[in-house]
Amino acid sequence: MTVTDDAAALAREAPEHNPFMAMLTRFDRAAELLGLDQGIYRILKAPEKELKVAIPVRMDDGSFEVYEGWRVQHNSTMGPCKGGIRYSPHVNIDEVRALAAWMTWKCAIVNVPFGGAKGGVRCDPRTLSIGELERVTRRFTSGIIDIIGPDRDVPAPDMYTNEQVMAWIMDTYSMHKGHTVTSVVTGKPWGLGGSQGRKEATGRGLLTMVREAADVKKLDLADATVVVQGAGNVGGTIAELLSEVGVKIVAISDIDGYLLNEGGLDAKKLVRHLERKGQLAEFKGGEYIDGQGLLEMECDILIPCATENQITSVNADKINCKIIVEGANGPTTARADDILDEKDIFVIPDILANAGGVVVSYFEWVQDRMGYFWERRDVNLRLAKVMRTAFRQVLKRTKTSKVNMRTAAYIEAVDRVANLQKMRGLYP
Ligand code: NAD
């Protein structure tokens, strides 16, 4: 472990960097402002179910490795649980808990009839062969098989998982059931029960957020500059969609460094390059900078699309933009929220901004159950409508409750789930 790795590991353990604590801080604030009943507060705070599994896997060299995996179901008041599965060397139970709770609030904001869940496997997918990745996925699926299912809990892609991983999950589940069950998972490939537009749905949802936020802040997108952190599914897609409509992307990063072009990057070419090479370095259309510094660049709109805890009490003061649209889950810590507020930066919070993924996941689940698949145009139109409505409802809440967009989003979500919980009542 290097000194930098050591520092990063320590930082991850600091209370400010605990994602579940970050979620609870915002939840508590919303609960207090809503005057939430103490009993309902306690129900909504506690995850309903947490399953930890050991995942023994035969490696290509014949040795065995045992990975840890988790599935957390935070709350199922609104329907079957829903949430992605993340592969990462750092994932831990508190991160999965936080991500599961964020899914509960996210589904409520966009009125999708799902509860919140999340899964994680602690492994480094960048060092696994395709065969090892498949064996990890299939064994993890069999480990959690009793608690997932189309009417129970429906996984989806997240960091370092993709359409291929979803196809393996669907196949493993189907083999256990004895027949094909496409609706057990979303984000599948087209032709295996996948929906048109799902892969780019989170990025497409962000596009609606960028447009709405620019409108509120009277920012002309034709003259705006954008910086994107993360060049994966979410970051790559929003970069491509924004440059398609003529918005200038001046920088984009991956885990190793970032690409800079003050005149605007050709995001379409960049995404094709990433599909071939898997990393930003060597792309000809910009200067590649090995290292950090991207988040503090001056720009109009900053779109973090990588991971948690990127904007913290340490660097929030140095953030130099007018609008932040959170593509990632939990990129900003609760302490950083206050600093960004003081700087009058308009933040579109994760539980609203990146909800496009779960909206089209819901469309995919509906299509799988109907056995009838929609055209891409219909998917995109419906998605834009849902996202616009959600943005405007949250914006309205900022005015009625005199709070920022993050607190308004939490108030809106917690209020909806709390009311439904009261209507369902408590069993027995
Ligand atoms: P991905 O694996 O496709 O891409 C992640 C990108 O972030 C890569 O470019 C990676 O190099 C970069 N990255 C990772 N750690 C980094 C770090 N510490 N610093 C800088 N860059 C880093 O993942 P994704 O699906 O695009 O997800 C990105 C974020 O968006 C996650 O927070 C995820 O939870 C969230 N999200 C994803 C979806 C979805 O549909 N995929 C939906 C909602 C939210």
Image (spheres, rainbow, N blue to C red):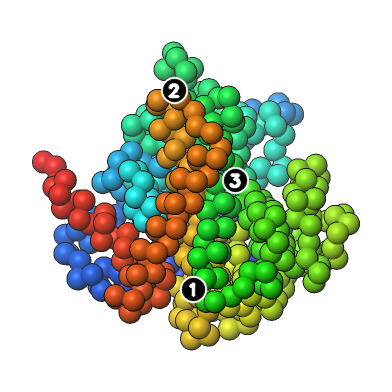
Q: Position of residue 48 (x, y in %)?
A: 29, 47
Q: Amino acid at mark 1?
A: Val
**Quarter of the rendering containing residue 114:** top left
User: Which residue, given by chain and number where applicable, does mark 3 sit on?
Assistant: 200
**Numbered disc 3: secondary structure:** loop
Nearest the viewer among 184 and 314 is 184
**Numbered disc 1: secondary structure:** helix
Lateral position of residue 132 relative to residue 316, left or right: right
Q: Is disc 2 surrounded by few (<14), some (14 to 19) or many (20+) residues within 10 Å?
A: few
Q: Residue at x 36, y 56 (%)?
A: 109
What is the C-alpha distance between the residues marked 2 and 1?
A: 40 Å
User: Which residue, given by chain and number where applicable, does mark 2 sit on?
Assistant: 371
What is the C-alpha distance between the residues marked 1 and 3?
A: 25 Å
Which residue is most to the bottom? 342
Looking at marks 3 and 2 on the same chain, the residue that comes earlier in the sequence is marked by 3
Lateral position of residue 26 relative to residue 206, left or right: left
| 98 over 184 or under it: above or below | below
Nearest the viewer among 4 and 374 is 374
Q: Residue at x 60, y 35 (%)?
A: 163
**Which quarter of the rendered picture does the C terminus lie within?**
top left
What is the C-alpha distance between the residues marked 3 and 2?
A: 22 Å
User: Which residue, given by chain and number where applicable, does mark 1 sit on?
Assistant: 216
Q: Is residue 396 visible?
A: yes
Q: Amino acid at mark 3?
A: Glu
Nearest the viewer among 282 and 7 is 282
Q: Is disc 3 surrounded by few (<14), some (14 to 19) or many (20+) residues within 10 Å?
A: many
Q: Amino acid at mark 2?
A: Gly
**Quarter of the rendering containing residue 143:** top left
Q: Position of residue 222 (x, y in %)?
A: 67, 69
Q: Specify whether tag 1 is near ligand 1 (CB below 8 Å).
A: no
Lateral position of residue 88 relative to residue 406, left or right: right
Q: Is residue 14 visible?
A: no
